[in-house]
Image (spheres, helix red, strand yellow):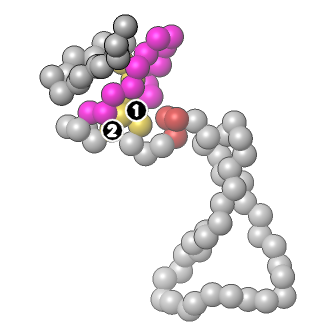
């Protein structure tokens, strides 16, 4: 994932002085198409293929893609036909 940033000068300076020597971005724009689901910190998108589903794995603390869901906590309610 790439992040592009622009720094503009406006003649006015806003901010707070502190002892840390780091720059913290307060506004960030991401172009459409540059961000993917796997770029999120809690998503493991490895193993993507046609027909996979996503399920949360509480042990690993992340969402995983899989073609088989075996979980005793899952209930699928399809409605009334």
Other residues around mark 1 within 10 Å, as few (<14) / some (14–19) / many (≥20): some
Q: Position of residue 34 (x, y in %)?
A: 67, 39
State the SS at label 1. Answer: strand
Question: Tags 2 and 1 in contact by the CB under 8 Å rule?
Answer: yes
Q: Tell me which secondary structure the magenta stretch mostly adopts.
A: loop
Q: Which residue is mark 1?
A: 44
**Residue 46 in which image quadrant:** top left
Q: Position of residue 24 (x, y in %)?
A: 57, 72
Q: Mark 2 vs mark 1: which is more N-terminal?
A: 1
Name the residue at 41% across, 37% down: 43
The residue positioned farthest toward the bottom in the image shown: 17
Name the residue at 49% across, 83% down: 20
Against 17, residue 70 (above or below) is above
Q: Which residue is mark 2?
A: 62
Residue 29 lies left or right of residue 10; in this view the side is: left
The residue positioned farthest toward the front in the image shown: 81
Other residues around mark 2 within 10 Å, as few (<14) / some (14–19) / many (≥20): some
Name the residue at 36% across, 34% down: 63
Residue 51 lies left or right of residue 78; in this view the side is: right
Against 73, residue 24 (above or below) is below
Residue 73 lies left or right of residue 28; in this view the side is: left
For the N terminus, the quadrant is top right
State the SS at label 2. Answer: strand
Q: Is residue 52 magenta?
A: yes
**Residue 57 in which image quadrant:** top left
Against 9, residue 30 (above or below) is above
Of residues 77 and 70, the one nearer the viewer is: 77
* Magenta part of the chain: 45-57
């Amino acid at each position: 994932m790439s992040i592009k940033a622009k720094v503009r000068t406006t003649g006015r300076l806003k901010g707070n002085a502190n002892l840390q020597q780091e720059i913290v971005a307060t506004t960030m724009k991401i172009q459409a198409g540059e961000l993917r689901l796997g770029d999120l910190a809690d998503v493991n998108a490895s193993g993507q293929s046609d027909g996979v589903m996503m399920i949360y794995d509480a042990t690993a603390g992340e969402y995983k893609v899989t073609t088989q869901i075996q979980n005793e906590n899952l209930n699928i309610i399809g409605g009334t036909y």
